[in-house]
Image: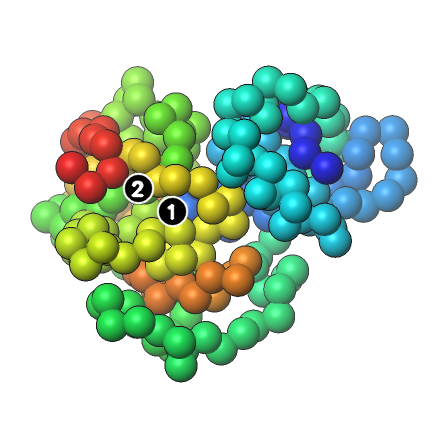
Amino acid sequence: MIYKVFEQDANTLLEKPETGIGYQIISAFQYERHIMRKFVVYNTNLAVELDSEFIYHKNQVVQRGYNLMLGKSDVIMLETNSIKVLKKIDVENKIDYTNNLNNKGRYSGGKGAIDNPEERSNGTESFVRISAYEDDRRVDMVNKKLKPGSFATTKVDYLKCVMLNDNPIDRYALPNDEEIKWAFHINPKLGDILQRGVVQPAFGHIGGGIEAYFKSGTSDGTLISKRPYGK
């Protein structure tokens, strides 16, 4: 099933880390029920239950659009204290797609960002957060920064994806398969903390792009621009 996340729960999710760029895999109890359920949540607002019908419902979102489904779906309330963000490996067996990697500048092997050590930004490297949503809730448009627990990719890897006409959904192993329409350009300040790694396979996608995880977000004023994808 597809649900609109209750506003309070959506705000709680916004305070928790992402599983990957633009989404969270979560487990939680539905309010006043005693069955643990798993969901893939897009942009903290739209939850697609991770069950045997996940692919069908995911395709409904792609065909009808995020905004339409958000407007027509029933609201689901969760037991706030039970919400847990899961890693990809918690819900999908590790699959080795490396033999199928294309020649569009992707990487094989390595670990995902959250499994690698923290490092400090040098103050000159740029990053890009790609998104299907103009109102990406992980981007703080008031303070011009990425919120804590958010993913992005390096500008170098983003440009490879664009210039080599690669598929960003497959490169960054995104679950929703919605067209990527926006690119938020970020220049972290000297000392901002990040972890970087290789996007791991998930949701039938190969991955192999570069991801960067900002556990504490980025400093104020680090969002440089919001542009249409590829521009």
Q: How many marks?
A: 2
Q: In x, y percent, where is residue 12?
A: 59, 30
Q: Secondary structure at mark 2?
A: strand
Instruction: Say which of 207 and 116 sits in front.
Output: 207
Q: In x, y percent, where is residue 174?
A: 46, 51
Q: Earlier in the sequence, mark 1 or mark 2?
A: 2
Which residue is found at the position 60% from the left and 37% from the top? 60
Q: CA distance from mark 1 to mark 2?
A: 7 Å
Can the viewer see residue 169? yes
Which residue is found at the position 33% from the left and 54% from the top? 167
Q: Is residue 76 left or right of residue 45?
A: right
The residue wearing badge 2 is: 129
Q: In x, y percent, where is residue 2?
A: 68, 34
Please say if 164 is above or below 13.
below
Mark on residue 151? 1
Amino acid type of the residue tagged 1 in the rendering = Phe
Quarter of the image for the C terminus: give it.
top left
Callout 1 crowding tier (Cα within 10 Å): few <14, some 14–19, many ≥20: many
Q: Is residue 71 left or right of residue 230?
A: right
Mark on residue 76? none
Camera-side mark, 1 or 2: 2
Query: Which residue sits furthest left?
Result: 124
Instruction: Say which of 221 and 112 sits in front.
Output: 112
Q: Is residue 170 left or right of residue 33?
A: left
Dot 1 and dot 2 residues touching (CB under 8 Å): yes
